Image (tube, rainbow, N blue to C red):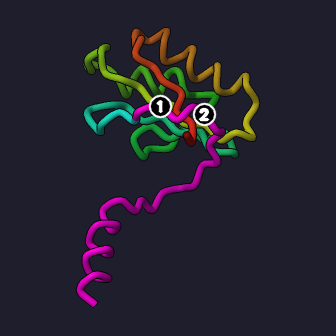
Amino acid sequence: MLVLLAILMVTAPVINYEESINLPQGSKSKQVSDFKKIDIQIDKNRVVIINKKKYDIANFPDSFLLFVNGKDKNTPVHIRADKSLKYDDIIFVLKSVKESGFFKVALVTDG
């Protein structure tokens, strides 16, 4: 019983109750520790989620500029996109992030 309680205590903080995004397979490189970063997720319905706030993909560039107003441009940006999306949608978001002045941008895969 004590072992089961210990397992539950270890796994409970890791569980996230968010929308599931089907990530493509990528390389099995070392994972980056969790520090200040901007998380961008694009689900299969083309809804962009920036740090848990939802935006339409058509309005993403303006919404992102308002979101990052006053933030440090050296902050890493992680983009997670559903693998069933068109390549154009992912590149549109990537281009918008880079045009706003962020250069530490990474596409996150399920590696």
- Specify start and end residues of the magenta stretch as a single range: 1-30
Residue 89 percent location from the top left of the image: 68, 27
- Say which amino acid is labelled 2: Gly
Residue 77 percent location from the top left of the image: 41, 25
Q: Is residue 86 left or right of residue 110?
A: right
Name the residue located 33 percent from the left edge and 31 percent from the top edge: 37
Q: Residue furthest bottom?
A: 1
Q: CA distance from mark 1 to mark 2?
A: 9 Å
Depth check, front residue: 23 or 44 = 23
Name the residue located 40 percent from the left edge and 36 percent from the top edge: 31
The residue that mark 2 highlights is 26
- Say which amino acid is labelled 1: Ser
Name the residue located 73 percent from the left edge and 22 percent from the top edge: 88
Secondary structure beneath label 1: loop
Depth check, front residue: 38 or 13 = 13
Name the residue located 45 percent from the left edge and 62 percent from the top edge: 17
Residue 27 percent location from the top left of the image: 57, 31
Q: Quadrant of the C terminus?
A: top right
Marks 2 and 1: in contact by CB < 8 Å? yes
The residue that mark 1 highlights is 29
Residue 11 percent location from the top left of the image: 34, 66
